[in-house]
Amino acid sequence: MPTLSEEQVKREVMDLHTSVYEQFNYEMKYIRPPKGEYSESTVSYCNTLRIYNCNVVICI
């Protein structure tokens, strides 16, 4: 996502958000960018939507 323009980021995030909501009736709270790659503008935009970047790997 760091190579996408601001408009592309908005479209990607909102398309995903809409799809999840329509299929599961669930408001997204977290997003993990592909390959864990993100930019400050991506994080900033997602935060305005109250969708937070989750870049954590849990090993059990």
Image (spheres, rainbow, N blue to C red):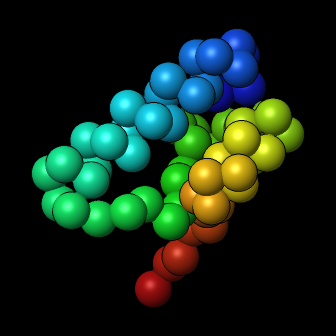
* Vertical position of residue 17 compared to residue 5: above or below: below
Residue at position x 53%, y 62% from top? 30
Residue 21, x across and y down, in percent? 27, 53
Residue at position x 19%, y 48% from top? 22
Question: Is residue 55 among what the camera can see?
Answer: no
* Vertical position of residue 33 compared to residue 11: above or below: below
* Vertical position of residue 42 compared to residue 29: above or below: above
Residue at the extreme left of the image, as rendered: 23
* Vertical position of residue 37 compared to residue 2: above or below: below
Residue at position x 62%, y 61% from top? 50
Residue 3, x across and y down, in percent? 71, 16
State the residue in front, 33 or 16: 16
Residue 29, x across and y down, in percent? 50, 65
Q: Is 47 situated left or right of 24 in this image? A: right
State the residue in front, 19 or 54: 19
Question: Is residue 10 among what the camera can see?
Answer: yes
Could you tell me how many numbered marks the image carries? 0
State the residue in front, 40 or 46: 46
- Quadrant where the image shows the N terminus: top right
Residue at the extreme right of the image, as rendered: 40
Displayed quadrant of residue 41: top right
- Quadrant where the image shows the C terminus: bottom left
Residue 15, x across and y down, in percent? 38, 32
Q: Is 58 situated left or right of 42 in this image? A: left
Residue at the extreme bottom of the image, as rendered: 60
Residue at position x 48%, y 28% from top? 12
